[in-house]
Image: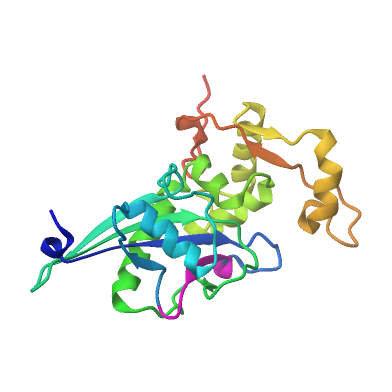
Amino acid sequence: MSRGATGELSSGAAVFGFDPEPRTPASRALHVLTLKRGLPRADLGARERFAEAALRAVGEAGLDLGQRRGGRGGQRLHLVSVEDEPGRARSVTVWYYATAPYGKFAGPGAWSTAGRGLRLDARDSEALRLALERLRADTRQLAGAAALLGDVFTGDDLLRLHVALHGGPEGSERTFRRRIQELRDGGVLRPVRDSEVAALRLRVPRFRSPAGTGGRPPELLRYSGSGGEDEQLAALRARRAG
């Protein structure tokens, strides 16, 4: 069907970044990429797929999600909704969400705290609400949490992310940390190789001991990539005596 028959076709993305620095309050640690008063969005080009248009829109805002036209463009994009606006000319927008490392970048876009104080156009505000729901569901699994934290993280990073997205673990922090240790002992989380640790601690301040404490620095972890129910961070299992 020709584009003239279908009307406006567009694609957009809510790209989330997490500020892992301990000095940032958890309530302000989750950010979303914004462009003016909205989320990145673009009309479909000739022979362009929805995922490709979303990646292009994000790129034009200043972030590179690592895919190129003709490649596996949807690999890091998660479908959120298909917004259909019937009218004189049919209008369809496909929304995705993605995650990206939080930090400075060059471009017209900006990181905005994804909280109640964020003011977007009504259409984009609803897309962001749906994207946040999907992100919260996905980050209850370790694979989703690791995607937002990046390649290397600490147990405290996982805890702060959980507080930012879910208001805290279901149970005490001690129980949550014990669950992280179980995942580490079970191989779902694996420690970073000793040969890499020194360089990582030198480059990333939060990977060192807190200044002036002389305490033991946190263990650096990676997600092993395995899947399964045992990775659920929110569903902290109740132990039953044999």
Residue plotted at (67% across, 46% down): 155
| Viewer-proximal residue among 13 and 131 | 13
Is residue 217 inside the magenta stretch? no
Q: Position of residue 159 (x, y in %)?
A: 61, 52
**Which span is picked out in magenta?**
27-37
Q: Is residue 202 found left or right of 191 in the rendered image? A: right
In percent of width and height, residue 214 lies at: 91, 54
Q: How many marks?
A: 0
Looking at the image, which is closer to me, 47 or 87?
Answer: 47
Q: Quadrant of residue 160?
A: bottom right
Residue 102 quadrant:
bottom right
Relative to residue 214, is residue 191 drawn left or right? left
Q: Residue furthest front?
A: 46
Q: Does residue 85 lie above or below 131 as drawn?
A: below
Q: Position of residue 147 (x, y in %)?
A: 54, 47
- Direction top: furthest residue: 242
Q: Residue at x 55, y 56 (%)?
A: 100
Q: Along the line of sight, which residue is nearer the eye, 103 or 75?
A: 75
| Residue at position x 52%, y 30% in the image | 239
Residue 190: % across, % down: 68, 32
Q: Is residue 230 visible?
A: yes
Does residue 227 appear left or right of residue 183 in this picture? left
State whether residue 15 is above or below residue 67.
below
* Residue at position x 39%, y 49% in the image: 78
Q: Is residue 114 visible?
A: no
The colour scheme applied to this rendered structure is: rainbow
Judge from the rendering whether residue 174 lies leftward or rightward of residue 206; answer left or right.
left
In the displayed structure, 234 sits above or below 8; it is above
